[in-house]
Image (spheres, rainbow, N blue to C red):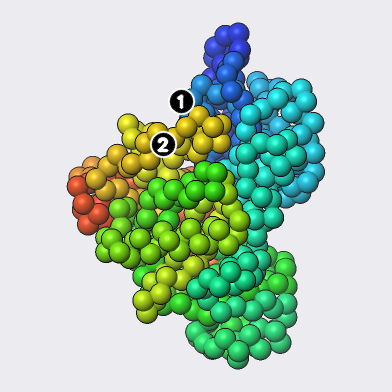
Amino acid sequence: MVTTGWLMVRTPALLVGFAVWVNSGVEFSEFDAAWAIIGPMRRVVLLIPSATYRATDFVTAATALDLDLIVASDRRSALHAVMGERAQVVPLDRPQQAADQLVALHERLPFDAVLGVDDQGVLAAGEVAERLGLPHAPTAAVAATRNKHALRERLSAAGMTQPSFALTSDDQGVAEAVEAIGAPCVLKPLDLSASRGVIRADSAREALAAARRIRDLTGSPDILVESYVDGIEVAVEALISAGTTNTLAIFDKPDPLEGPYFEETIYVTPSRLPSGVQRRITDELVRSVDALELNEGPVHAEFRMNGGEIVTLELAARSIGGLCSRALRFGAGVSLEELILRHALGLGVDDRRLDHCASGVMMIPIPTRGTLVHVGDVERARAVDGIEGVEITIPAGQPVVPLPEGDRYLGFIFASGEAPGDVEAALRRAHALLDINIDGSQ
């Protein structure tokens, strides 16, 4: 992102404003343009990958809580010139080394909590918290959520309802897995998120083609083959406190996710499922969390309803991805990020009730590979009744890649309303108005 603007930093002594000019062609990550707060109160470390969507919202939440913030990322940014040691470059792909660096920093700048805002940072955050005796989930439990095969093994040992699965490392293994599990099946890389590399195959031939495509994407031979589970899918957002799992929201996913790829689009809460089914979903979440021995922090999980069963698909030891958390506000307008930070610091979470009758978000899908020329009629989409915001997150002129290889959305649409159906309808109307122009000639 090329950015011109003001970056404000509050030091313990005074509030200093300074202009940051970024010349054309220089990338500037999201948290460079966010508000960074350095104050006299509690201090927290946020592990923020440079490619994340989540930086601005977490830094804004830290601002609201008047926290002394340390930002640790995998890439140097403009914040380093201003924040000094409070802006750290750490190898998030090497959690032990990242933890060594942050534990050493703690001797000079003691902090009260450490939080990985996305998948890439949760292992390092857990390792730091464990070494320093800060509240955290066991690192082995967090590690299981970062490896889809390890997750399946842990859930299987606890007798959870989940897809049949097999770990493979070559074409012969894939063929044998399909024969044992049956078709249709789903092939997945072990450590990607947001449906990247997830492909449905309806035959052994399709499975082998999918496996080659996944290996090209990841560079790893390891692929998980799972049985395909049909049915309605939901996502659940929760916060675990001292071993107690508190469900914050159940999101319906009204668009069917049947493959061959599994691009998510619309999330709407509260769920329109019967209350009894919702209770069973939350019960299954608690069982899954207990099976993994997760006992602190945010959780994002996905389930499918199949033949009367609640099937656990995914579970991550972090909050919802992208900008989707903006669809949630609690109590008197408290963000999900503020709720998570308050929990991490032991400040108490008084009101977890959603403050809208209904709300939702649409992750704007990328329809084809190419170069984004423009997204037009954004203001018309914003003017739709019930729409609270439309954010286009890929600049014009940038390459766009759809799933299963792509790792970004074109943007996000946010809505609220009296009922979930109103929210869904508003999201669809706004999306239909967008004029998405992609040059696919290259």
Q: In which quarter of the image is the C terminus?
A: bottom right
Residue underneath mark 1: 64
What amino acid is found at the position of numbered circle 1 in the picture? Ala
User: Residue 319: x and y, percent?
Assistant: 50, 48
The answer to whether residue 329 is visible is no
Label 1: which secondary element:
helix
Residue underneath mark 2: 335
Residue at image position (38%, 51%) is 249
Q: Nearer the viewer, residue 228 or 159?
A: 159
Label 2: which secondary element:
strand
Residue at image position (38%, 72%) is 305
Mark 1 touches mark 2? (CB < 8 Å): yes
Looking at the image, residue 39 lies above or below residue 133: above
Residue at image position (37%, 43%) is 328
User: Residue 213: x and y, percent?
Assistant: 62, 74
Looking at the image, residue 5 lies above or below residue 92: above
User: Residue 196: x and y, percent?
Assistant: 56, 63
What amino acid is found at the position of numbered circle 2 in the picture? Ser
Q: Which of 1 and 384 is in front in this view?
A: 384
Left or right: 163 in relation to 237: right
